[in-house]
Image: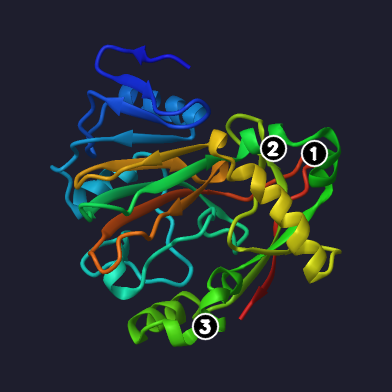
Amino acid sequence: MTASQTKQLKVVPQAGRIGAEIQGVQLSGNLETSILNEIKQALNEYKVVFFKGQNHLTDATQEAFATLLGEPYAHPTVPVKDHTNYIFELDSAVGAKANHWHTDVTFVPEVPKYSILRGVTIPEVGGDTIWANTNAAYEDLPDGLKKLADKLWGIHSNEFDYAQYKRSDIDVNEVTKKYRDVFESTVFKTRHPVVHVHAETGKKHLLLGGFAGRLEGYTTSESERLLSIFDSYVTRLENTVRWKWSEGDVVIWDNLATQHYAVADYGDRHRVVRRVTVGKDVPVNQENEVSQLIVKK
């Protein structure tokens, strides 16, 4: 991968297999179509793109820019931030620390396409985010594991996401518990192919992460062992890129081409990021079989 240059825009790779910084762009709701298309092309190639120095953005202008990439996607259980139309706020003061590997909102069949995340309050040290390339992870699998993965179905639920907190409630404060209760106010379970074919690129990607609790047709213990093998390929350092946030940074990622992990290493220091999610796809495997909702209660 090498840096590429257009009239206004420069794409600078940040790691060997995933991630690029885009320079020379001021994001807005009035962005030129040609620049928007360059951003989309970079997303197809690099999976996640980073923009520094976007401090001019407000909640409203972040929303306006995000809608250029697709129709806003409402989170199934968590309300939007007050006085906004689409923003999902992750505020560490109210327990919102997504310190586990995941693809966003895979517990429903229609999985969001792009996430646009803005750094609002960033601790001086810590709070980085890491993204992983799930196509590279699939391609790294030995042939036997590829053939197995191609046939598997995973059961995803928002119950699985925070299971560790339920087992150790003594370590979780009341604010965090309230956030978890809201997150799980409606329980979803969805059947997804473990390997889906990306709608834009046609490449195969592993579709797993923190919401995938078990594999269809396997016991809990068997599922845990197999999932740990597949997950180990996703999270290999070779397949990842790590971003150190500054206030005003904006990151856009292809949700169905990646997993991500927000590193919760900043203690009691305050961290606030705001996300707008747009677009949606129902994952499809190589046999053209689609994801299905199993439970909503």
Residue 11 vs residue 59, the one in the foreground = 11
Q: Percent position (x, y) of residue 47?
A: 49, 34
Give the image's coloring scheme: rainbow
Is residue 250 positioned above or below 212 on the image? Answer: above
Estimate the spatial distance between the alpha carbons at disc 3 and disc 1, rounded to whole Å: 36 Å
Secondary structure of residue under mark 2: helix
Name the quadrant containing residue 26. Answer: top left
Q: Is residue 140 left or right of residue 25?
A: right
* Residue under numbered circle 3: 168
Q: Is residue 283 in view?
A: yes
The amino acid pointed to by label 1 is Lys
Q: Percent position (x, y) of residue 119?
A: 25, 50
Tell me the residue at 70%/33% (across/down).
Answer: 140
Tell me the residue at 81%/41% (across/down).
Answer: 145
Is residue 138 positioned above or below 41 on the image? Answer: below
Tell me the residue at 31%/59% (across/down).
Answer: 87
Q: How many discs appear? A: 3
Residues packed near mark 3 inside 10 Å, few (<14), some (14 to 19) or many (20 plus): few
**Mark closer to the chain start, 3 or 1:** 1
Residue 107 vs residue 139, the one in the foreground = 139
Is residue 24 positioned above or below 289 on the image? Answer: above
* Residue under numbered circle 1: 146
* Residue under numbered circle 2: 138
Tell me the residue at 28%/19% (across/down).
Answer: 9
Residues packed near mark 2 inside 10 Å, few (<14), some (14 to 19) or many (20 plus): many
Depth check, mark 3 against mark 2: the one in front is 3
Tag 2 near tag 1, CB within 8 Å: yes
Secondary structure of residue under mark 3: loop
